[in-house]
Amino acid sequence: MKFLYKKPRVTPPVEGRTGVMIVNLGTPEGTDYFSVRRYLSEFLSDQRVIESSPFIWQPILQGIVLAKRPFVSGENYARIWDREENASPLRVYTQRQAEKLAKRFKKDGVPVEWGMRYGKPSVSQALDRLMDQGCDRIISIPLYPQYSATTTATANDQLFRALMKRRYQPSVLTVPSFPDHPLFIKALENSVRETLQGLDFKPQRIVASFHGLPKTCVDKGDPYQKECYRTATALREALDLREEQMPVTFQSRFGPLEWIQPYTAPFVTDLPKQGITKIAVIMPGFISDCIETLDEIGNELREEFLEAGGEKFAMIPCLNDTDDSINLLEKLSRDALQGFHPSEG
Ligand SMILES: C=CC1=C(C)c2cc3[nH]c(cc4nc(cc5[nH]c(cc1n2)c(C)c5CCC(=O)O)C(CCC(=O)O)=C4C)c(C)c3C=C
Ligand SMILES: [Fe+2]
Ligand SMILES: [Fe+2]
């Protein structure tokens, strides 16, 4: 058991000091082949994400998938790269969310840090930074509105893995998913209303496109799909829309297996045949814009829709680092703080 306790923390914890950590998926450090390969290799080696036996999957991943996909994905990342920050949008927004949330908690003496499940800064580094500031209690917020074992659970696994290596373990509270949290739905509602106000057309449909998931995951009990429907139902209610006006679809399919349906691309490219040529797309499964929203929807799907006879296409931005987004994160954090300090209100 020597590998445990490798890292003695020298800073004694301050009794009762709580820190907040926001955890996102992770993203490549650059758009070149090796940066993307490193990222995809770590991501797709996670058995929470690909559940096949590693004896079968690893040769396929290392030999076939990682030979080609980093080139293709690298080109896609290059199209959406934040040139000013020289970083992937997912990283830029996650960092800004943490910085803005930290400002909200400054007077409370609650530090806020951010970590990525895959790549850097890691969850372990975020934990170090909180513990270095004396935290003996950690609130961890996986930045996924809908729970999935492939995202929420693996983010939590990574935190507990990091704790395994430490002699002193802070107390940890992991924040649950928030598919129909009032502030989440309010933030989505506001983003829809704001985007629609700026358009020169009225969309005939607002397609709610969520990240997909292999169907087997849902069959085995992953509540993700149900939570996506909870989000969509609450958002429709807030906007007073009927089900057909805001259909739910699933995007970003990976690999040959069946994923949950309907798939976004065929659904959307079929709309012009039905006389629906003006649409907006919202992606309420993503807190921050990333390759899947900006490129797969904003670039690829837009082009496919227009080629299929569509006339107008609008993308509703994710919550990113808007005030509404930070209000939500602050509320989730403050409610969790109450869990740690119930008598202090
Ligand atoms: C089997 C593979 C995948 C599963 C399962 C999966 C679930 C899943 N992912 C997100 C959120 C994001 N995924 C992102 C990128 C991305 N996802 C996969 C594969 C699976 N995702 C890949 C291979 C990639 C990389 C991009 C590519 O090469 O196409 C991202 C964006 C990352 C970025 O850098 O911008 C997010 C966010 C959810 C919510 C989810 C399960 C519900
Ligand atoms: Fe994904
Ligand atoms: Fe994609």
Image (tube, rainbow, N blue to C red):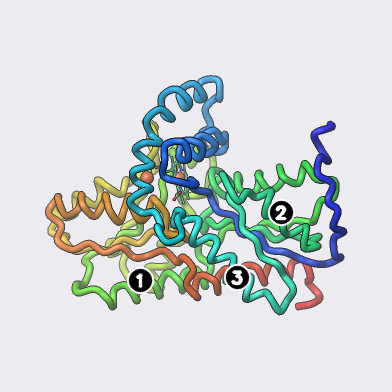
Distance from the alpha carbon under mark 3 to that under mark 1: 23 Å
Mark 3 surroundings within 10 Å by alpha-carbon count, few (fewer than 14), some (14 through 19), many (20 or more) = many
- Crowding around mark 1 (Cα neighbors within 10 Å: few <14, some 14 to 19, many 20+) is many
The percent position of residue 200, horizontal first and vertical second, equals 19, 74
Q: Residues within 10 Å of mark 2 (few under 14, many from 20)?
A: many
Q: Quadrant of residue 228?
A: bottom left
Q: Which residue was labeled with disc 3?
A: 101
Q: Which residue is at the front of the view, 304 or 146?
A: 304
Residue bearing mark 2 = 127
Disc 1 target residue: 192
Q: Position of residue 233 (x, y in %)?
A: 41, 63
Specify the amino acid type for callout 2. Leu
Which amino acid, by three-letter code, is at mark 3? Leu
> Which residue is at a point 46% across and 36% down the rendered structure image?
34
The C terminus, quarter of image: bottom right
Q: CA distance from mark 3 to mark 2?
A: 17 Å
**Percent from the top left, x then y, of residue 50?**
51, 34
